[in-house]
Each structure stands twice: as C-alpha cells, then as structure tokens.
Amino acid sequence: MQESTDAPPHATFRRVLLKISGEALMGDQGYGLHPPTVARIAHEVKTVHDLGVEICMVIGGGNIFRGLQGSAQGMERATADYMGMLATVMNALAMQAALEAEGIHTRVISAIRMDEVAEPYIRRRAVRHLEKKRVVIFAAGTGNPYFTTDTAATLRANEMHCEAIFKGTKVDGVYDKDPVENADAVRYDDVTYDEVLQKHLKVMDASAIALARDNNLPIYVFSLDQTGGLRSILQGRGRATRVHG
C-alpha cells in the first residue's frame, strides 16, 4: 500500500528545512559553541519532530570562522570559504550529538567528503533518511566557495522538496531596519521576494532569495529565542514574517 504524504494532523507542513546561523549556537559568548544553547535548540527541533514533521537543517559557521571576514583580512577568498565550510561541519556534529541526546536519529551529510565523520551528499539517500523520520543536517554549504549557507539552505530545500524554509534569528521577523538599534523599525507580517531584493531587507542573500522565488519556496523568519516558537508556527499560529511570491 502506498504511504500517505498528507501532513500530520497537528502541523501545517510535512517537510521543512530549518536554517540557523552559527552565531545562534554561541549563546552569550563571543565565539564558539555554548552547549546549553545547542541543547535548547535541539529540544525545539524535537518538539517539531514529535509532530511527525520531516526536518532537515543547515547551520552556518560564523561562530567559528566566516569566509568573508577572512577574505576581508587579506586571505584568498576560496581558501577562506573552505575554512568556513569546515566550521559548519563542526557545528553540524555538535547539533547531531544534541539531537541524539534527545533520542532523535540524525545524519550529518557533508558536501565535502569526510567519510569518517559524515556521509557524502547523495540526494536520494538524503531523501530516504527524511522518509525514515531522521533529522538530516546538511554541512559544508554547497561544497563550493563564493556561496553562502543561505544559498546552500535554499538549494537543499528545493532538492529535498521541502514545503518551506524556516530561518531562525534573534528577532521575531523581518524589519525595514535593525530593530535592536532602531526603536522605530517597522516589522513586516508578509513580504514578497521582490520587495526583499528591492529594499535590501536582511533576510537571506540575493542569490538565495532569487532561488526561492524561482521555485516558489516560502521563507518564514522567526525568533529562535522564543521557546516553542517553531512548533507554534508549524501549527498555524505563532509569530513570523512570511516571504512569498
């Protein structure tokens, strides 16, 4: 008998990609990983996994090394970007450990081969992991320099046939300017891809937004600091900005 592909009864999406920055893993520290913060995010993922939603993740590496910063300091850009990709693998392994401590089977899949610590990226295998209700963490970006983890997230979400991207940030949506530094910042409940590009709103980089637009893949921007925020949004409530066509 063919398996049903209907969404779980208490969730509005069947398969999603969660994109978080590397900085989200360092808590109040200025650098590196903060294990309690990693554990807290892993628990948030578990609450969504418990709904029956299939989840894949892309985590940045800015808490350890950012390619653009290395390039700005005189390092050759491609080398700096490869170092940033390796930082994402470290973050992915940390998140895998935290998720498995929550009892969730997890696979780290790297775009750069390192068979001792992660599986190589094979699209059909990754899809099969999701079908088996494993959380899949995509590491090492696209495997190519000059592409951000935002672009990697949008690419993988399309390849995995995800229904939406959820981007966890420090604020509860998209604003016309930084709400931390500007009290008069205006928040958007909904915004189009073209508005994001035209107004230079800081959602994702331009190539990621264009790729999402071309494939009609919605992006939800929400606060990663709000307990239960991701689960609430997946259940059709909660606070987030939707980027759409």
Image (cartoon, grey):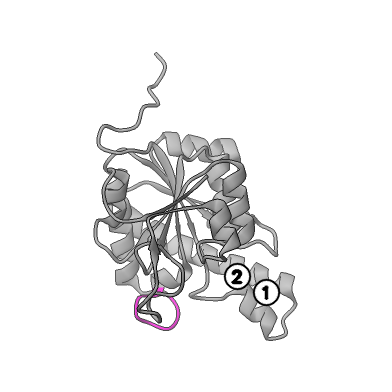
Using a 10 Å C-alpha cutoff, classify the residue at mark 2 as few (fewer than 14 neighbours), some (14 to 19) or many (20 or more): many
User: Dividing the picture into quarters, in which one does residue 68 lie?
Assistant: bottom right
The residue singled out by tag 2 in the image is 84
Label the magenta part by its dominant secondary structure. loop
The residue singled out by tag 1 in the image is 80
Q: Which residues are magenta?
A: 26-32
Q: Nearer the viewer, residue 85 or 176?
A: 176
Residue 35 vertical position relative to residue 58 in the rendered view, above or below: below
Question: x, y percentage for residue 34?
Answer: 36, 74
Q: Nearer the viewer, residue 188 or 113?
A: 188
Residue drawn 47% across the image and 66% down it: 21
Question: x, y percentage for residue 222?
Answer: 36, 59
Residue 229 vertical position relative to residue 125 in the rendered view, above or below: below
Question: x, y percentage for residue 224?
Answer: 34, 63
The answer to whether any part of residue 236 appears in the image is yes
The answer to whether any part of residue 109 appears in the image is no
Q: Give the numbered dot on residue 228.
A: none
Q: Is residue 228 magenta?
A: no
Real-space Cα separation, disc 2 to disc 1, in angstroms: 6 Å
